[in-house]
Image (cartoon, coloured by chain):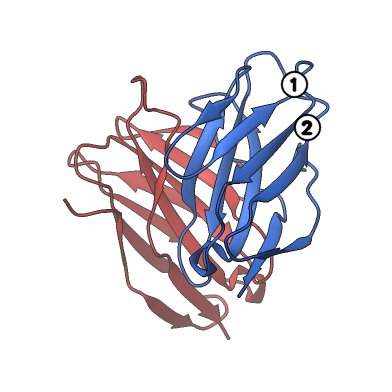
Chain colours: A blue, B red
Amino acid sequence: DAKTTQPPSMDCAEGRAANLPCNHSTISGNEYVYWYRQIHSQGPQYIIHGLKNNETNEMASLIITEDRKSSTLILPHATLRDTAVYYCIVSPSWGKLQFGAGTQVVVTP
Amino acid sequence: DAGVTQSPTHLIKTRGQQVTLRCSPKSGHDTVSWYQQALGQGPQFIFQYYEEEERQRGNFPDRFSGHQFPNYSSELNVNALLLGDSALYLCASSLLETDRSYEQYFGPGTRLTVT
């Protein structure tokens, strides 16, 4: 079973920030939090990952709580091309990715 | 720089038959992982190959087997196909034992239909 809990779906208006929550209360000390997304009919795409500190790259920001039991992926300015299923995954850096059902994000004009 | 490629794109097989799916990793990558994605679900890890050996395995029966070649490409074999094996099969590559081992690049997948 997946080690994370995500809402099944959420909507976001184009140009606004999208905040995607994820609970991972059983995360181990050596496990990272990864975010991937899957646009329809494509393979999953890596977005960002983190261990303890908040991270930011050209695609998104990742906020991890101090106790590491939850995190939030932030898409700062959502576009229609960000419509996808977003997966939050916890795993060691070299480990298998254990996908759950993810969150279906729909960005609307 | 070619990304991960998979062949064939689509495949239709009959129950009880055997199938082989192929994957070429992203240039420079040495590790290949295979995933099964049923309709409406997230991908499920099958196994991972590194240095031509199976390194990790998910909860899949022995009917699922694989191979990695010296050029790092990989095959996934499924014997005695069941209707439930119908799914999208995804290949992902990565570069192990580096500071970028966290990032897996996925191919577009092979859609297998078992009738």
Q: Residue at x 60, y 18 (%)?
A: A53
Q: Is residue B78 visible?
A: no
Which of the 4 quarters of the picture holds residue A108?
bottom right
Quadrant in which the C terminus of chain A is drawn = bottom right
For mark 1, name the chain: A
Query: Is A21 left, or right, of B48 in this rendering?
Result: right
Inspect the image, locate mark 1, and give the three-letter code of the amino acid beneath it: Arg
The answer to whether A26 is drawn above or below residue A60 in the figure is: above
Inspect the image, locate mark 2, and give the three-letter code of the amino acid beneath it: His
Q: Which residue is label 2 attached to?
A: A24
Residue A67, position as x, y percentages in the image? 79, 16
The answer to whether B2 is drawn above or below residue B47 in the figure is: below
Q: Residue at x 62, y 60 (%)?
A: A85
Dot 2 or dot 1: first in sequence order is 2
Q: Nearer the viewer, residue B88 or B85?
A: B88
Query: Is B80 left, or right, of A106 in this rendering?
Result: left
Label 2 – label 1 distance at C-alpha: 8 Å
Query: Is B115 left, or right, of B93 in this rendering?
Result: right
Q: Nearer the viewer, residue A15 or A4?
A: A15
Nearer the viewer's eye, disc 2 or disc 1? 1
Disc 2 and disc 1 in contact, CB within 8 angstroms? yes
Q: Residue at x 45, y 39 (%)?
A: B48
The answer to whether A41 is drawn above or below residue B59 in the figure is: below
Residue A34, position as x, y percentages in the image? 58, 36
Q: Nearer the viewer, residue A42 or A11?
A: A11
Indicate which disc residue B54 carries: none
Q: Which residue is label 1 attached to?
A: A68
Which of the 4 quarters of the picture holds residue A9?
bottom right
